[in-house]
Amino acid sequence: MTELFGDIKKCASEVLGVKKATKKTNYSTDVQVVELVEKKAEMNRHLSSNNTKDRKEARKEVKGVQKQIGKRLCEIENKRADSLAETITSTDNTRRMFEANRLLAGIGSSSEIMVHNSDGKDIHTDAGKANEAMKHFRSQLTEGVDESLPAFIGEPKPLDCPIRSAEVAHAASRIKTMRATGPDSVQNELLKHAPTIVYDRYTECINDSISKQMYIKSIREGYITPVQKPGKPKG
């Protein structure tokens, strides 16, 4: 029987996934905050059960402890902000910089995204969600497109009107900064403020790709990250 329940538990965790533990609102693991909260709770219990003590004075003491809790939480938040600012100014990792900027701006990590399949059933595993999202975007991006249509038509030949370096430079100047990198790990800031020689080389690569009918893997691929819309129901 023990083995049976063990197999059921294992199967459920693989198919449905394990629900992540949730924390209470304003939850803190700081030792000083925890001690102050416990002290405040104890004082409130005494205040409710003790009718002989001056209740006005007792309430004043409770408010004093509450102020200490608020002061300590402000100290923790300031240290956190300083740490995030240090990450932004010192790191060369675009992803870490992007996450730190979001947190510093008060944009917390989004709640877990709910995904359901075509039958309306919820998917609880990350792998299942990723697979369903991939199928969804594939159908959206290829709707009405004949999969048998070749990427290139005709034999490879030089372009009648090749792309110019100035056009690539103009397109790069309009790129938005402070964005996460793609599979090639090239930052938008690098492309936007690059010297002319970089645009010349990019132009050569693009023209060669089209005229020789070859894919440039780093340009062809990209990352898609589904994000839960604020205020919208999950799923």
Image (spheres, rainbow, N blue to C red):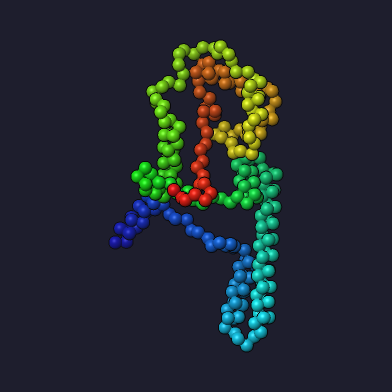
Task: Look at the image and tell me whether residue 171 can be seen.
Answer: yes
Residue 185 placed where, x, y %?
59, 34
Q: Residue at x 47, y 48 (%)?
A: 113
Q: Residue at x 64, y 85 (%)?
A: 53
Kindly indicate the quadrant of the structure image that contains residue 173. Answer: top right
Q: Residue at x 65, y 50 (%)?
A: 104
Residue 10 placed where, x, y %?
37, 54
Relative depth, front residue between 221 and 48: 48
Where 211 sits versus 96, above or below? above
- Count the marks: 0
Residue 174 placed where, x, y %?
64, 30
Q: Residue at x 69, y 56 (%)?
A: 78
Indicate the quadrant containing the N terminus: top left, top right, bottom left or bottom right: bottom left
Kindly indicate the quadrant of the structure image that contains residue 201. Answer: top right
Residue 121 placed where, x, y %?
37, 48
Task: Look at the image and tell me whether residue 200 can be seen.
Answer: no
Q: Residue furthest bottom?
A: 52
95 to the left or right of 15: right
